[in-house]
Amino acid sequence: MRDDEQVLRETEVWFVRHGLPYFADGLRTQVEAGLARKAVAGVGALTVLAGLLAGLLVEADFPTRLLAGMLVAGVVVVGYGLARLRVWPMARWALGHTFDSLGLLFPLATRALPLLLLFMTFLFINTEVWQVATTMDHGVLWVAVLLFAAFAIGFLLVRLPEEVDRADDAMGGVRLLRGCQGTPVEEVAERYADDDVAEIAQVRGYEAGNLVFVLLVTQAVQVLLLSLAVYLFFVIFGAVAINEHVMLTWLGKGEVHWLIPGWHVISLELLQVSTFLAAFAGLYFTVYAVTDETYRTQFFGSLLDDLQRAIAVRAVYRLLRRSPEPER
C-alpha cells in the first residue's frame, strides 16, 4: 500500500499533467520566487529595453516600429513565463481540452454568428470601411488587431474569476469523493469525507490564477477559431461578390493590389478589410460568450467537472500535507 509521501508525489505529477502546476507546493514556491519584486523588475526592464531596441532597429514608420517593439516585448514575457512561471503545462492542457471539445463551437456559432454576420456584411460592403481599413499600413492594422485582443483579454480577466469562485463552493462529502475518483488521492480521500473542508477548498492566490489562466486560454482559442471563420467567410464572399471595378470605385484609387499578380481573385485590400472585421468579431464573440447564459452554461458546464475535480484533489492534497500519516 502506498504511503502518504508517495501519494503526494504522484498527486503533484497529476497536477502538472492536468495543467495545475501552481497546485503543487514545491512548484508554486518556485513560481513565487520568479514573481518576486526584484525578478519582476528585472524582467520588466529587460522587456522595455528589448522593445525599445527592436523599435529603433526597424527601419519603418512609427506604427510598424511600435508593432515590432510590442512583438519583441511579448516574446520576452512569454519566454520568461515558459522558463520560470510554468506556463506551458497550463497552456498545453487548455489547448488539448479546447480541441477535445470543439463541438461547443457549433452552439456558439449558430447563436452568435447569424446576427453578427448580418450586421457585419453591411459593414463589409460599406465604402467608408474599405477606405479606413485599406488606408492603414500593416503596422497600424496589426496594432489595431492587438488593441481589440487586449480589450477582449481584459474583459475575460474580469469575468472568469467569478466562474472559479462558483466552482469551489460547497466542496466536501460526496462531492469530494466523487471529484477524487480516478486520481492519486482516491484511496485517502475517504479519511476526510466527513470533515468540513469548505475553507481549505477555497481557491485563492496563485492557484486561483492557475485556474483563471486555463479558462482564459481555452476561451481565447475558441474565440480565435471563430474569428478565423469570420475572416475566411469575408475573404471568400469578397472574392466571389466584389470585382475589381467595385473595389476601384470604393477605394478611389487607380489600382488594386492582388495577392497573386495576374490572378484577379483575392486582393490585398480584401485581406486587410477581412482582418479588421474579424478582429472586431473576436471582441464581439468574447463579450457574447461570457454574457450569454446559454453558452456559459454549455461552456462552463463542460469544464465544471474538471474544475471541481482539481479543487477536490487539491483539498485532499493540502489536508494530507498538513496531517501526519496515520499509524498502521
Image: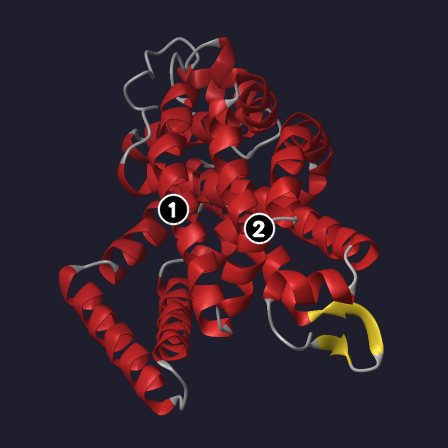
Indicate the secondary structure of the residue bearing disc 2.
Answer: helix
Q: Amino acid at mark 2?
A: Leu
In front of the other: 327 or 127:
127
In the picture of the structure, the residue carrying the numbered disc 2 is: 277
| Lower position in the chain sequence, tag 1 or tag 2 | 1
Residue holding disc 1 = 151
Q: Which mark is residue 253?
A: none
Depth check: give the residue in front, 308 or 78: 78
Judge from the rendering whether residue 314 lies leftward or rightward of residue 264; answer left or right.
left
The residue sitting at 31% across, 56% down in the picture is 31
Q: Given the image, on which type of amino acid does mark 1 rest? A: Phe
What residue is at 40 percent from the left and 91 percent from the top? 59
- Give residue 81's quadrant in the image: bottom left
Residue 17 visible from this viewpoint: yes
- State yes or no: discs 1 and 2 in contact (Cβ < 8 Å): no
**Residue pictured at 47% horizontal, 33% vertical:** 287
Residue 220 position (above or below residue 85): above
| Picture layout, residue 135 above or below residue 216 | below
The location of residue 226, given as percent across then percent down, is: 65, 44
**Residue at point 30% right, 80% down?**
50
Q: Pick the quarter of the image with the C terminus.
A: top left
Q: Is residue 47 left or right of residue 303?
A: left
The image's colouring method is: secondary structure
To which quarter of the image does residue 35 belong? bottom left
Residue 68 rendering spot, x and y as whole percentages: 41, 77
**Residue 2 visible in image:** no
Nearer to me, 62 or 267: 267
On screen, 279 above or below 169?
below
Please state, as top left, top right, bottom left or bottom right, where the N terminus lies in the image: top right
Residue density around tag 1, few if under 14, some if 14–19, many if 20 or more, within 10 Å: some
